[in-house]
Amino acid sequence: METLLKYFFKAVNWLLTQFFGDAYQGVKKRFAKNVQRKIKEISNQNQPVIDDRGTLFLGKTETNFVIGGGTGQVAYEPESVRTFYDDSFVELPDELNQIRTRIEQTEIAKQDEGLKHLYNTHQVTLVNAVHSNVDFIERGFPILHFKKSDYYSYQATVASLDQPIASDGTTIRQKYIDTIKDYQEPSPFLSQGVGIVLTVVTSDEKIVISHRKDTGIRPHEMDVSVVEAIDPDKDYTYDPNNRQKKSIDLYSAAKRGLYEELGLDVQKDEITLLGYGLDLEYYQWNVIGTAHINLTYDEVLRQKSSGIHGMNELKKIEAVDLDPKKVAQLLKNNKLWSTAQVALYWTTIYNMNEYSRKKEMDKILLEIM
């Protein structure tokens, strides 16, 4: 009986094809797709719902990084990067301003007693971020709007996200971050301490990896070569159309960070900016880039050890080969914050030769992570 039905349907299918041709085949395909979609919908009703935060996956591992712009494959043209800067201070909500005031009072008291204390420097917050296209082939570029802030405000927000601010134990993260509907729209009072996250690639094709000191954010953790907060008092330029108006020079911040942390005097044309985004673990916005320098890793190591620069946050450095499998193994075997993971991922695919480099790297990550 089953065999007869099979032949019957085949015969009907042949007759309809003969009479109606392509029109019948089109109806048949649409019907099949509708059936498949319905089956999928029924199947999905029994699956757990996963909240899509818009974060990047590396292999099967979800990071905490939300891409604001960039892919790692194409560099920003320096002349297309646009920044705007408002020199007035960003205002904190009252409860966060109270935390900042306590921090300031504590650190001033330490300073007066000659104790180790946190020095308050000017920083910037990100007020608005837009990723646009520069031409018909859609090469992207960022338009970033900054406002003035300081390190104590950073300590009261980014460094205190899990601190309770209400009698019921509600934290800053729960009140202000978990309720955000669109992570690609920055919160001006939370996006404190925006910085430049850089990898250094040496002439012998190694990526410089750093280890942080035991103080500050992420103590003792492995990190990329340089993480430097933008300083509006040092990293500024003037709007070419209005010499009275300042804007932020991202390349100046990158150059300063490379010198202060590693003792490297790098030129602007050696620095490549690849994108920017938000690390949800710290609500930390950063611009990600890479610097390809004409020094070997051993020369970088000697330069760092010369003592002519600050080395404020780095305890030691090491290197990983600029090789997709080596980088993937490092990502798998070491604890790094998500921004550092993305910086290493973008650096690797940017420096691979073939256009299919992203697909190749993604395949390696799926196998390893």
Image (cartoon, grey):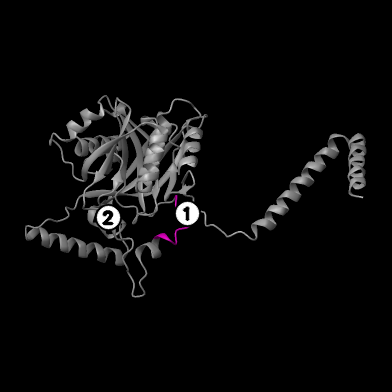
Residue 237 visible in this rendered orientation of the protein: no
Q: Dot 2: few (<14), some (14–19), or many (≥20) neighbours within 10 Å?
A: many
Q: Please name the residue shown 72% across and 53% down the image.
A: 39
Residue 58 to residue 283: above or below:
above
Asked which secondary structure carries label 2, the reply is helix
User: On the image, numbered disc 1 is attached to which residue?
Assistant: 182
Q: Nearer the viewer, residue 114 or 338?
A: 338
Q: Quadrant of residue 314?
A: top left
Q: Main secondary structure of the magenta part?
A: loop
Magenta-drawn segment: 177-184
Residue 65 visible in this rendered orientation of the protein: yes
Asked which secondary structure carries label 1, the reply is loop
Give the amino acid at mark 2.
Tyr
Q: Please name the residue shown 18% across and 35% down the image.
A: 304
Q: Is residue 29 left or right of residue 213?
A: right
Q: Quadrant of residue 168?
A: bottom left
Q: Quadrant of residue 316?
A: top left
Q: Nearer the viewer, residue 132 or 288?
A: 288
Give the amino acid at mark 1.
Asp
